Amino acid sequence: MTMIQVRVRSIAWEAEGILSFELVDPQGGRLPAFEAGAHIDVRMPGGVSRRYSLCNVPGETRFWRIAVLRTPESRGGSRTMHEKLRPGDLIEVSEPHNFFALDETAERTVLVAGGIGITPLLAMVHRLQQLGRRFELHYCTRNAARTAFASELAPLLADGVVRIHHDNGDPKQGLDLAALLREPRRGTHVYYCGPAGFMNAAKAATAHWTAGTVHFEYFGAEPLAAPETSGESTMEVRLAKSGRTIPIEPAQTLLQALRAAGVDCESSCEAGVCGTCLTPYSAGDIEHNDLILNDDERRTEVLVCCARVRQGPVVLDI
Ligand code: FES
């Protein structure tokens, strides 16, 4: 991953628990352009990276904007961003990557955001406006105090293109996703992003939509639970192309085992949500723990950053 240095130009309060950060080139130059749905990885002290969607107008190269929700269970990412970063600080970030690209040719686009999941969808709103495309945004938040970017969305709210739904902490009072997405419409694409419960509801509500018309992005994953294994204490991973065999412990992810053996392996989120570490495999019983592969894909591919071996040996095609 190519890293670049950027300066935090400003930090703004957007809503309860949410700050936005504007990032600029330290020498006053231009930053790489980005597309709607793209994110950057921000390197935290200690080398851990966190992924944040770019939420200003796509194509903007004078600055990037990200927004960060401070989560109580933060493992250092959002807490560091909120408590340690100050305007003027220099930080290391990746160039933009996009695993949540917008189909700009769709006749109509339905965007559904839950909480901080608004960030990639806000960039899509800006892009769809630039293109003059038909779209609607449903933005689900707890209440007005937790609604980031409300003033930016206000003109579209007045036009009825954006609807904000508050649930006051009770999902039953919130937007009825099943009703909203009941009828798949020809030429319509759906995009959704939000916290785990919201993602499950949106996934169920779009299960009957045609493949390729529903797009989503997870922004976090739970820490892995204790491994489900056959009881073997050490298992094996065979690397088909190099002919190597490496050991793996039941609690280790494939990525950890590969790295421990000195095998080079690209990764980004290390939480099974971005697809960077996708690796083909031809044999083995794998405990997939990612949030993006479907059952078909899991038969031949694995996201090694979060997968473990249930029963060895596993044969990776690398
Ligand atoms: Fe992101 Fe594995 S590194 S899915």
Image: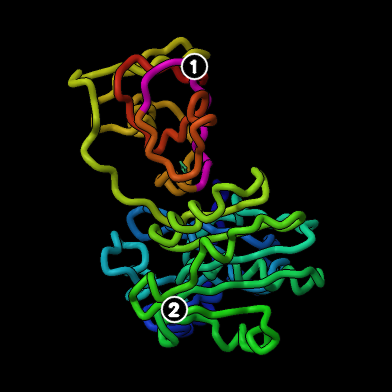
Instruction: Tell me: 25 left or right of 30.
Output: left
State the image coordinates of residue 3 (x, y, percent, origin top left): 54, 53
**Magenta span of residues:** 274-286
Indicate the quadrant where residue 250 lies: top left
Closer to the camera, 54 or 297?
A: 297
Closer to the camera, 265 or 236?
A: 236
State the image coordinates of residue 89 (x, y, percent, origin top left): 45, 74
Above/below status of 175 relative to 270: below
> Badge 2 local density, few (<14 within 10 Å), some, or many (20+)?
some
Residue at left 34%, top 76%?
169
- Could one spot residue 147 in this view of the protein? yes
State the image coordinates of residue 34 (x, y, percent, origin top left): 68, 61
Q: Which residue is mark 2?
A: 19
Secondary structure at numbered mark 1: strand
Amino acid type at circle 1 is Ser
Residue at left 27%, top 69%?
72
**Magenta span dominant secondary structure:** strand
Closer to the camera, 46 or 52?
A: 52
Amino acid type at circle 2 is Leu
Q: Can you tell me whether the CB of the residue at mark 2 lies under 8 Å from the nearest atom of ligand 1? A: no
- Could one spot residue 87 in this view of the protein? no
Q: Can you tell me whether the CB of the residue at mark 1 lies under 8 Å from the nearest atom of ligand 1? A: no
Residue at left 48%, top 52%?
204
**Badge nearest the viewer, 2 or 1:** 1
Q: Which residue is mark 1?
A: 282
Secondary structure at numbered mark 2: strand
Earlier in the chain: of badge 2 and badge 1, it is: 2
